[in-house]
Image: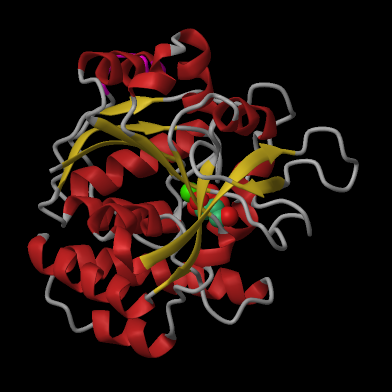
Amino acid sequence: MERIIMDVDTGHDDAVALVLAAGSPQIQIEGIVAVAGNQVRERTLENTLNVCDYLDIEAPVFAGLDRPIVRRQITAGNIHGKTGLDGPVFPPRTKQVHPGNGVRFIIDTVLANPHEITLVPTGPLTDIAMAIRMEPAVADLVKEIVFMGGSTGEGNVTYSAEFNIFADPEAAQIVCTSGAPLVMMGLDVTLQVMLTDERLDTYREFPKKAASMFCASMDNYMASCRRHGHDYPAMHDPCCIAYLLDRDMFSFERRELQIELQGALTYGRTVVGPHLDEGGALIAKKTKPEQFWNMLDTAFRNLP
Ligand code: RIB
Ligand code: CA
């Protein structure tokens, strides 16, 4: 059983990560923290509560931080829309935000379950960095931090930087230099998992409300990606969950990993250094997209 805490900026692909996690019995979601990223935290929190309520996800949902640690806040409404999850229309929800502090929840859960909890951030690393700064033991006692972010090639916000890192580079540097066991699911690998029109059409036939939410969400996400010159939307965030379901579907390089914080043109770049035998970060390089889609099909069959 993989016991995880998801730290999300629910947007369209974060919602797919929630579907894959909730529909995979090998995964136990201990809690979900909504951080500012794709949209302001009020929106990412609302989207996370709506998705969890709609999919009957019982895990508690907490509010994370509402802004990056140092830089001015940026969001990705150009891709994810004003709501941060344009497309699906949810019924009135009953699920309420947990009154606790999301960063405190991360710290307390990791420390109470040494080497048992995997953190799965799929937005900016703001909450994870704050948890490590408030309680450095988190870096020693977390099982793994499997994050969606970065690229060893081009970025997707600037030519140098991917959105999750660019939205809070200082937080990413804190995490990358913390000594925690890191797995980077960057654009190198997530851009290999693209949703085609043909594949999306197959989900329109699924008689499940999770699939209907997926289709309403992906119709919007696909149109938005095409307005920005991309042929198909990539399944960035759910790749983190796929890793937990089958590590062998990915190939990796273990490299030193740091974040560029000074460059006028390279601010927020994930900079890989020498190959390492231990430490650093596992950088995902290749995957098997068909295995991803098989996992998602299974998740839909397990969900309402
Ligand atoms: O660059 C892709 C990442 O930025 C994904 O996590 C997406 O949800 C956005 O947050
Ligand atoms: Ca995200």
Q: Position of residue 298 (x, y in %)?
A: 15, 69
Question: What residue is rendered at 23% in x and 57% in y?
Answer: 245
- Residue 165 is drawn in which quadrant? top right
Q: Looking at the magenta stretch, what is its main secondary structure?
A: loop
Q: Position of residue 125 (x, y in %)?
A: 53, 33
Side of 222 where 267 appears, left or right: right
Outermost residue, top side: 134
* Residue 174, magenta (yes or no): no
Q: Residue furthest right?
A: 264
Question: Looking at the picture, does residue 267 appear above or below residue 41?
Answer: below
Where on the picture, by quarter, is residue 158? bottom right
Give x and y (percent) for residue 1.
Answer: 12, 43
Q: Which residue is pictured at 70% across the width and 38% down the height? A: 259
Q: Is residue 184 depicted above or below 235 in this figure?
A: above
Image quarter (top left, top right, bottom left or bottom right) of the C terminus: bottom left
Residue 83 visible, this angle: no
**301 or 45, which lies in front?**
301
Magenta segment range? 98-103
